[in-house]
Every structure is written in C-alpha cells, then in structure tokens.
Image: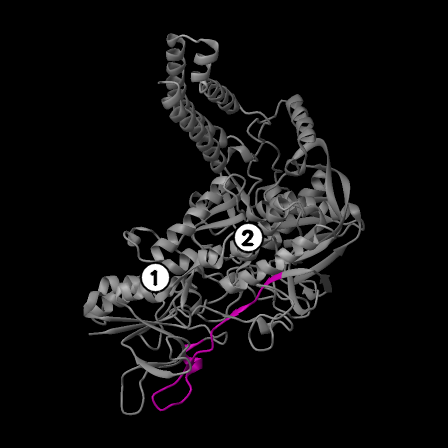
Amino acid sequence: MVKELVVYPDDRIVMCGPVRSFKDPSLPKLLDDIKETMEHHNLTALTAIQVAHPFNIAVIKLKDGSYLELINPSIISKEGRFESTETTSYFPDITFKIPRFEKIKVIYEDRNGELKSLSVDDRELSATIQRKLDFLGGATPLFRLDQNQRDSVIDALKSKGIYQPEEVCPLFSKKDYITSFNDKLIFLMALTLPAPLYKKFFDFKESTIAAFWSFDKYSYIATWILMVIYFIYAQYEAKKYRQCTSCQIGNQIGIILKRLAAATAIFAIAFFLVKA
Amino acid sequence: MARLVVMGGGVSGHTAATFAKKWLGNDHEVVVVTPNSNWNWIPSNIWVGVGEMTKEDVVFPLAPVYEKAGIIYKQAKAVSIHPEGKEGSDKPFITIEYTGQGKEGQTEEVEYDYLINATGPKLNFDATPGLGDGNGQLGPHTVSVCTADHAVHANNELQKIFEKAKTQKQKILIGTGHGMCTCQGAAFEYIFNVEFEARNRGVRDNLEIKWISNEQFLGDFGIGGLHIKRGGYAASSKLFAESLFVERGVDWIIGAHVNKVEEGKVSYELLDGTMGEEEFDFAMLIPPFSGVGLKAYAKDGSDITDKLFAPNGFMKVDADYTPKPYEEWKASDWPRTYQNPDYKNIFAVGIAFAPPHPVSKPAKSVNGTPITPAPPRTGMPSGIIGKAVAHSVVDLIKNGPNAHLHEASMAEMGAACVASAGKSLTKGTAAALTVYPVVPDFDKYPGIGRDLDYTFGEIGLAGHWIKHILHYMFIYKAKLKPGWTLIPE
C-alpha cells in the first residue's frame, strides 16, 4: 500500500525507536509498503519515519533495482569527506549541499533480525545512507547545514509559503534586545563609580552625584526586572525553536546570573562611593 | 540486637549503611566491611585525571565518619559468604581479610542477621590482554580514572603528553577497553575534559583525540541511548553526542571490542568482523567489570557460589534471569527488592547485583564476539537502591520477616546525570540529563521506551555549575554533616 509521505512542516519526523520484534507480521508489510511508496513517488530511499511509522528502518533502492532494507542501522566507521548534493522528499524541490563521509561501514539487521554489515565505497550510496540515518536520529538535512545555507533554505521555504519560523533558531533573538539594553544600563552604572573623582577634578555638584546614585538604584532594580522578563520570554522562545543553543535553560541562567552578579557588585561599590 | 553487615563502602553501600544505622539507632548493629580506608566521590575522578582537582578533593577517610555514626568499621575485604552458618552453628557469617587497621592479612568471621552486598565491581583489566598487568591491576600501557589513585596517575601521564604537544603531534585515545564494558559516561566526560584542558593549555592543535567504544551508536551510554526533550521537541542522544564530537573535533570509532593493548597501540574488532589497530601516545580505557570474586559455601562446606552468584560474579537478586531474546525483554525482568531468592536475609545493591540482561540492544560481531555495553548501575540509581534496601532491612529487623520490602526497580526509576565536558567557572560545560525510566519500558512507553515528559537535557555552563555543586553536596552528605538526610541520592 502506498503511504502518505510526511512532508515539511509536518513535525512527526523527529523521533523514532528501535525495531524490537522481527516476528511481528506488520514489519514485512511495512517494508513492502515503503517500497511501494518509493516506487509511486519515484524515490531512491525512504525511512519509516517519513511515512509516519516511528521505527529505525531505512530502505534504499540500489542501482541494480534491488532494495536494501536497513533495520536498526548504525554507522560504525567512516572515512574521507566530500560535499554531497542532495534532495529529500521531506523538503520537496529543495537542494542541499551537505558534508558527508565518502566511505562508511554500516551494521544493520535484515527483516529476519540477522545482524549484517555493509561497506560502502560509492559516494552517492554513502551519502544516501547517511541522510536516511540522520532522519532516524531525528535530524532533517537542516541539521547539517551551516547558517548561510540554512538561510537559503529558509528563503526557499518562505517563497513556497510553507516556512515555519519555529523550525530553526535565528542568529539574533528578540531576547537579545533585553540583554543588550541591560548591558548598557550596567555599563552606565559602572561609569558613575568614579563619582568622588568627578567631584574632585571636575567639580560636579552634589545634586549631580545624587542623580548618579538615583540612576544606580533604579538601574539595579531595572536589572532584576529585566532579567525576570528575559527568563520568561526566553522560556517562551525555547519552545518555538528546535535547534537553538542560546535557548537552553542553562545558558539562560548563566546569562542572568552574570548580569545580576555584575549589577550587584557595581551597586554595592556605588553604595560606598556614589551615595556618600 | 540484630546485626546488619554491609560489604562495601561505595555509593550504594555507604548509603545503605548510614541510613540503616540512622533508622535502627543503637538498638542494633551495623557493620561495614570495605577494603578501602577512604570514601571516593568517583564522578569527580575525571577532574583529578586532568589536574583540575587533587586526590584529596575527592576522597575522605571513612573511619571518623563511621565512628561518629556508631557504625562498626572493618577495613577488610570480604572473602566468602556462609549463608547457612557452619557445622555446629546456624548463624550465617562472612569471612573477611583485613587490609588495614593494623590487622593486615588477618582473617575473621563476621556473623550477620542481614547482609547487604555492595562490593561494587572488580576492575577486570586482565579481560583484555595488555590492558591489565596479569595480576588484576592496571597494565603499563594505558591509564584509568576508575579510582582516585588511577586518576592521579592518569593526570601525571596526561601532563607529559601536554608538554610534548607543545612541540610535536600527539595522539590521545579514550574510551572502553573491551566489548562488554559499561561506564561509557565516565570515558565520555574524560575525553571532553581532556579536550577542554588541551585548548586551555594551547596545545589542542597538536593533539589528535579519538574516541573508541563498544556502543553501537554514539550516545548509547549503555542505556540504549535516549531521546531528550528540549523545548517542545525531542532530539536523540545520538545526534546530541555526534554534534558535540564534531563541534569539539573529536573523531570516533564505535562498535569496537578492544582485544589487545600493546605499547602505543590497541587492536580491536568491529561489529562487522573487521580488525583494526589504533596507535596512541596516551590512552585511557575503561576496563570491563565483573564481580569481586566472592565465594559462597553451604553449611556442609560445599561450594554454592553458583547458587548465589551469576556467572559474571554479580549476586543474583529478584530479577528474571531467564535467557530470552531482546524483543522479549521486559521492564518486569529487572529486580525490585534486590533480595536474593534463596537467602531472604541477603540483598545486593549498586553494581554488585546481577542485572537480568543489558539495556542496550545486544550485538555480536560476525565472528561471534559479543560487543554490547553492559548496563550501568552507578550514581543516582545505586544510591536510591541502597537506601531502599536499607529501608527494607530496617523494616525486617523491626517488624519481623513478613515486613513489606521497599522497591526500587530501575525500570520504574528516573535518574539525573550530569556529564562534564570541561571544568571552568566561566567557560565550563556539562550535559545535564534526566532519564525516566533508566531501563526503558516499551510496554508502558511504546516506541522509545521512556517518558519524554521526564527525559530532558541541556548542555551548558549551568550544567557545569550543577556538577561542581553536586561534588561538594554529595561529599557533604557522605560525611554525614548536619542535614545530610535532606540531600537526595
């Protein structure tokens, strides 16, 4: 039976588990369905997850027309690198250039559960297997792209009107405005610290120094408020993006703690130097 | 007055003994038999191994702690168990051989009412020719971070490599030294700490750092890998690990059984049956674990070791040890009470209990060599199990043999793991993961076997801070300082 292909932006692509039972009659049926789907859509390779079956199965059509069934496959060694030009049914009509290994050794199980191995010297087949194994690991080709290529793909998706902005993390997030503003506040707080010197050498008035102290107080309070807002917004944003290192809670906590520590230290020094 | 004897003073044994003593009070005796004079917070050994901590930072003397707690401490190794007593006495006992306290070499019989086996593993270096010295100890070609002393030695050798790397290329190989190893996590932490230190020392460009392991895929970690929830998505540990390896420029060999270690070279067999060799200037290879070699004897003196212990030397408990294929493995195969089926007053905790089977999918090379990570029973699970068993024993002592036994199945237990990838207050990183359950339950959670709501992870600076805080927190707890019971396992 020809199965419906999972196509971007359908996110059922991201998670699949191992095939555990080889006695289950649904396994050979699924393998046959994948092949029929490949024939129907004229595809050279397809994974079970691309037809919405969350299992570690990839089927590859070889040059001689036969099919290679890879169940629970894993690459155990690799050699050489090259840039592979690839397409995938998950992102129709989009071409990717992805760094791949030239030669690989793959272990996998056949439909009877027998462990097999395969040495692949052919670049095209090697890249195809790697692309399919990426899908089984929960990664689309976007995962392998550098930022420039990813931007190009996003532009292509936008031109098709199917771009889902939550798919990838942007280089600049709106939450960076918060930290940027806060950093400036902390910098200005630091500039008030030499107040006694300003007073001595530049004859600053008491009222000006008092204004500095007021600025420090309000900036310190503002830092805490901004960091709370930052954390709440960052949590919201983290749920939107799939690949996003700056979205990780550890980094957010680090960013917050660094600023709070800096603001607290400056405020404490200001208490003695500026307030007085 | 009942007597509980705990064999072993590691994470699980120490936890069991200290909680049991707290709950039993002075009405009953708790005896700890361990060959070590120090307690070692093993997760921090990797930092000793790169020179970021000293041995003294990760160990403390056990004697004063046990004295304060009222626990009888015997610095000795357990030699044999006599669960039926001996001729003329029905009282079960163990025989021990002292390794310290001025009684080195002396033997003694220690009677017990309840026995907890928490001996941990034997570091079976000799399972791989050349990895050991032929006498069960670490061989001359590689280093280890399994003990604090090993870690000190590892750091000494590493510093020599760093020194050489200032002027010449050096090769570093880190991973597992046998096809049936566990503790990939420790090796994983060590390789990234070495890489981090190399960068800090400005010698990274002259170092080729390579990972070798028995995992079928990067990120298996002996628990069959996991999917990590982050935000609204799930990423596999395979991608997670692979990304880190690529980002840090660390190459890898997986599905490998190291079958020989020589000066500057390891030989290995891959799952596809091919053989390979890898040269190195510095290698840290984790050895396989086995039971510590305890013997067991019946009342008439006949050897009943096979009755108490599995062939790998670990103690049989209430697990389902029926051999069965991978697809028939169930969460219910895993033990719940850790009670020996034949002798109800004997329990085994931590690494000392025999798991029913691995967690990772078993595999053999085409030559028939088993290459499968053994299941981890360390860290948080071992502490939880130790505490649960202590609870059971205390209830048995206080309420009699029909008392309800406390349960702590690894298939129903979550665990948190913090894996360091570099130690620095401002630039350090660590992967902080929670896994639920530790052993996947494919019936309850079809597909991936775990509950994604409780399986999540992050890598970043805060993870490092957590790891560092945990270092101090768990040593504080193990020293039984005020409030120690409030700190979770």
| Residue bounds of the magenta highlight | B284-309
- Residue at 49% across / 56% down in the picture? B54
Q: Identify residue for label 2.
A: B189
- Residue at 23% across / 72% down in the picture? B401
Determine if marks 2 and 1 fall on one subunit.
yes
Looking at the picture, which amino acid does disc 2 mark? Glu
Could you say where residue B465 lies in the image, as x and y percent from the top left?
A: 46, 43
Distance Cα–Cα, label 2 vs label 1: 24 Å
Could you say where residue A14 lies in the image, as x and y percent from the top left?
A: 56, 41
A248 relative position to B395: left or right: right
Could you say where residue B367 lies in the image, as x and y percent from the top left?
A: 68, 70
Q: Residues within 10 Å of mark 2 (few under 14, many from 20)?
A: many
Looking at the picture, which amino acid does disc 1 mark? Thr
Q: Is residue B362 magenta?
A: no
Quarter occupied by residue B412: bottom left
- Front one among A251 and B148: B148
Chain at tag 2: B
Res. B8 visible in picture:
yes
- Relative to B71, residue A129 above or below: above
Is mark 2 in CB contact (under 8 Å) with mark 1?
no
- Relative to A4, residue B207 above or below: below
- Front one among B437 and B6: B6
Single out the residue that lies furthest toward the front. Answer: A200
Looking at marks 2 and 1 on the same chain, the residue that comes earlier in the sequence is marked by 1
Q: Where is the N terminus of chain B found, in terms of image quarters?
A: bottom left
Disc ID at residue A142: none
Q: Is residue B294 magenta?
A: yes
Question: SS class of the residue under badge 2?
Answer: helix
Res. B489 visible in picture:
no
- Relative to B154, residue A186 above or below: above
Disc ID at residue B15: 1
Task: Please name the colour scheme applied to the rendered image.
Answer: one colour
